[in-house]
C-alpha cells in the first residue's frame, strides 16, 4: 500500500505533539496538562489509524479481482477487526 502525504503529515504532527509532551515532563509541568496533551496525541493516532484503514479498504475493494478470493464483505470485516484490535 502506498501512503499519501496526508498520512505522513499527520504522523509528523503527532511526533511534534509527543516531543512537546516530553518537553513538558522535563519542565515539570502539571500532571493535568501533560495528560491532556497525551490524550490529544492518542486521539490523533486513533484518527490516523482510521484514515489508513479506510484507505486500505478502498484500495482492496477497487483492486479486488479473481486473484484475490476475498469478498468485499470479508475485506470490510478484516478492516473492522483491525480497528477493534487497535483500541
Image: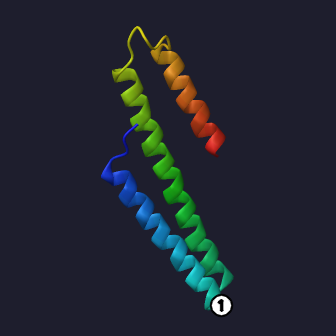
Q: Is residue 45 above or below residue 25?
A: above
Q: Secondary structure at mark 1?
A: loop
Which residue is situated farthest in the front direction here? 67
* Count of numbered circles in the view: 1
Q: Residue at x 48, y 13 (%)?
A: 71
Name the image colouring.
rainbow
Q: Residue at x 62, y 78 (%)?
A: 34
Which residue is situated farthest in the top direction here? 66
Q: Position of residue 13 (x, y in %)?
A: 42, 66
Q: Position of residue 81 (x, y in %)?
A: 61, 31
Asked which quadrant contains residue 29, the reply is: bottom right
Which residue is situated farthest in the right direction here? 31
Asked which quadrant contains residue 59, the reply is: top left
Q: Residue at x 56, y 26 (%)?
A: 78
Q: Residues within 10 Å of mark 1 (few under 14, many from 20)?
A: few
Q: Is residue 14 above or below residue 19?
A: above
Q: Position of residue 42 (x, y in %)?
A: 57, 60
- Drawn side of residue 46 relative to residue 61, left or right: right
Which residue is situated farthest in the bottom direction here? 27
Q: Is residue 38 above or below residue 53?
A: below
- Drawn side of residue 66 relative to residue 31, left or right: left
- Whether residue 29 appears in this view of the structure is no
Q: Position of residue 60 (x, y in %)?
A: 41, 25
Residue topped by disc 1: 28
Q: Is residue 49 above or below residue 9?
A: above
* Quadrant of the rendering where the N terminus is positioned: top left
- Drawn side of residue 26 relative to residue 18, left or right: right
- Whether residue 45 appears in this view of the structure is yes
Q: Residue at x 31, y 53 (%)?
A: 5
Amino acid at each position: 500500500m502506498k501512503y499519501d502525504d496526508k498520512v505522513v503529515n499527520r504522523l509528523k504532527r503527532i511526533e511534534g505533539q509527543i516531543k512537546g509532551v516530553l518537553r513538558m515532563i522535563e519542565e515539570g509541568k502539571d500532571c493535568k496538562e501533560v495528560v491532556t496533551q497525551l490524550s490529544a496525541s492518542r486521539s490523533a493516532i486513533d484518527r490516523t489509524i482510521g484514515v489508513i484503514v479506510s484507505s486500505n479498504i478502498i484500495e482492496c475493494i477497487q483492486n479486488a479481482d479473481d486473484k484475490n478470493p476475498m469478498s468485499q464483505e470479508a475485506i470490510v470485516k478484516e478492516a473492522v477487526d483491525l480497528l477493534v484490535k487497535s483500541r
